[in-house]
Amino acid sequence: MKIRYNREIISGAIFVVLSAVLWFLIPIQVQTLEKTPINAQTFPRIAIGGMFLCSVGLLLEGIFVREKQELYVTKESFRSNAFKKEMRSVVFALLLIAYCFLIGHLGYIVSTILLVLAVMMFYKARKWYYYAIPLGMVGIVYYVFKVLLHISLP
């Protein structure tokens, strides 16, 4: 089977839609009573506006500059190194999605420690300090936010 596609058009269109949805969700998610031009919604609007502009640029690049690529899907393509590399990215994204669900139930420390350990094992880290450094950072972040800044973490 042969598929013709253009990465820039696909990713640009997805992120244009995503940024438009996020833009309209800002007033619902970030509620503020301030009427000044700079308030709690300013930074999210800047970030999402930048994402929208970059996505439009990517979409236009895909439409006017890049040629479509052809992808041949065969049984051998599922055994290729490129497919395995893509699947590693998908598994990593699934780990992050699982972390998003776990953090509400298990809390910051437990879920973040589980994420760090899962990522380190997934990438086959062998040295002990590869585990110690991110685990130490979990403790430092918790201490800074919870104790020093008095900000509650989930």
Image (cartoon, rainbow, N blue to C red):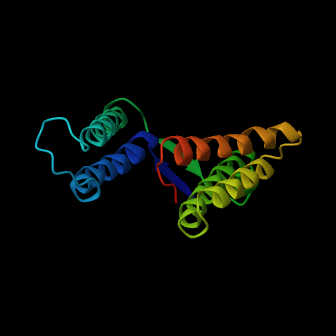
Considering every residue shown, the one lying at the far left of the view is 35
Res 128 → quadrant: top right
Position of 55 relative to 115 (above/below): above
Between 87 and 42, the one lying in front of the other is 42
Between 88 and 23, the one lying in front of the other is 23
Left or right of residue 8, residue 138 in this image: right
Residue 75 rendering spot, x and y as whole percentages: 72, 60
- Residue drawn at x 56%, y 62% is 103
Residue 153 rendering spot, x and y as whole percentages: 51, 55
- Residue drawn at x 61%, y 60% is 94
Residue 126 rendering spot, x and y as whole percentages: 89, 42
Question: Which quadrant would the N terminus be assigned to in this image?
Answer: bottom right
Left or right of residue 53, residue 38 in this image: left
- Residue drawn at x 74%, y 55% is 118
- Residue drawn at x 53%, y 40% is 148
Tell how many labels: 0
Residue 73 rendering spot, x and y as whole percentages: 62, 56
Between 36 and 126, the one lying in front of the other is 36
Considering every residue shown, the one lying at the far bottom of the view is 105
